[in-house]
Amino acid sequence: MAKHKNKILFQSELPSDTPEEKKGSLIVMEGEQPSMLDIDVDSYFGYWRASKDRLTYLLSNRNIDEIYIRINSPGGNLKECIDMYNYIGRLKEEKGCFVTTDFVGSSASAATIFGMIGDHIKAANNIGLLIHFARMFAVGTAEEVEKQLTEMKMYNSKMAMVYAKRSGTSLDIIKDLMQEDTTKSVEFMLGLGLLDEIYEPDPALRNAA
């Protein structure tokens, strides 16, 4: 497993006027070997933080055997997140790398979609996860807003398919959960099939178990 301690390849820098509630970072670093990469997403998806363009620039020309992704994110730009999900999926196919996604902090919305790209998905036992339908702010004529609404409904269906495929659960059950828009325990998500492992984050407690 890649360790979170080696050479930093990239760390996002936020503008000085970034609101406190929107601060965060994307960090990419080498693991125990150059072919092992750690990615920390501790921010919203999109814009100057976690983005597909940044990942492409950093990863496209590297030999990669393993990617370990830590996620602590409230979500963000859904399209950007899907682009990142698809890009990591393409790396898995082209390079044959194994991907672990680790929800180290409570995460929601688009962040949980990105987490589904893992071959092995794990989460700390003291957090919650939220899946829900997309939200949007619509501006324009009635026809333009209607077009945006149609697009959002399409993305909602695509999101539900990602969760359903990963969990083996029916689309109807997944859509009902997304409609609830309620944070669920990791035990619930494990039972649903959206997680493979729950772990104790405190080494002292873990070793005492």
Image (cartoon, helix red, strand yellow):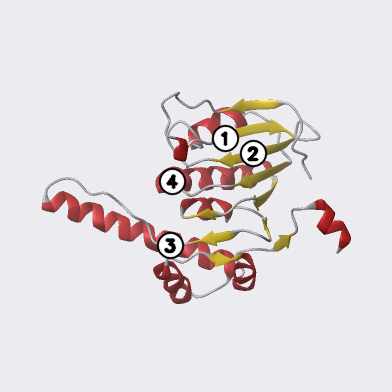
The residues tagged by marks 3 and 1 sit, at their Cα atoms, a distance apart of: 24 Å
- N-terminal of the pair, mark 3 or mark 4, is 4
Q: In this view, does 116 lie to the left or right of 119?
A: left
Q: What residue type is labelled 4?
A: Gly
Q: Do the residues labelled 3 and 2 touch (CB within 8 Å)?
A: no
The residue under label 2 is 39
Tags 3 and 1 in contact by the CB under 8 Å rule? no
Instruction: From the viewer's side, name the closer residue of 51 and 40.
Output: 40
Q: Is mark 4 on a helix, strand or loop?
A: loop
Q: Name the residue under label 3.
A: 132
Count neighbours of disc 1 (C-alpha within 10 A) and say few if under 14, some if 14 to 19, many if 20 or more: many
For the residues marked 2 and 4, what is the alpha-carbon distance in whole angstroms?
17 Å
Kind of residue sitting beneath label 2: Ile
Instruction: Please tell me how crowded label 2 is: few (under 14), some (14-19), or many (20+) other residues with Cα within 10 Å.
Output: many
* Residue 98 position in % (x across, y down): 71, 48
Between marks 2 and 4 in the image, the one whose residue lies nearer the viewer: 4
Q: How far apart are marks 3 and 2 (CA)?
A: 24 Å
Picture coordinates of residue 172 (x, y %)?
44, 76
Residue at left offset 46%, top offset 55%? 109
Q: Which mark is residue 76?
A: 4
Q: Are discs 2 and 4 less than 8 Å apart at CB?
A: no
The residue positioned farthest toward the right in the image shown: 208
* Residue at horizontal 42 percent and vertical 70 percent from the top: 180
Q: Which of 208 and 163 is in front in this view?
A: 208
Question: Contact, CB < 8 Å: mark 1 with mark 2?
Answer: yes
The residue indicated by pointer 1 is 26
Figure quadrant of the C terminus: bottom right
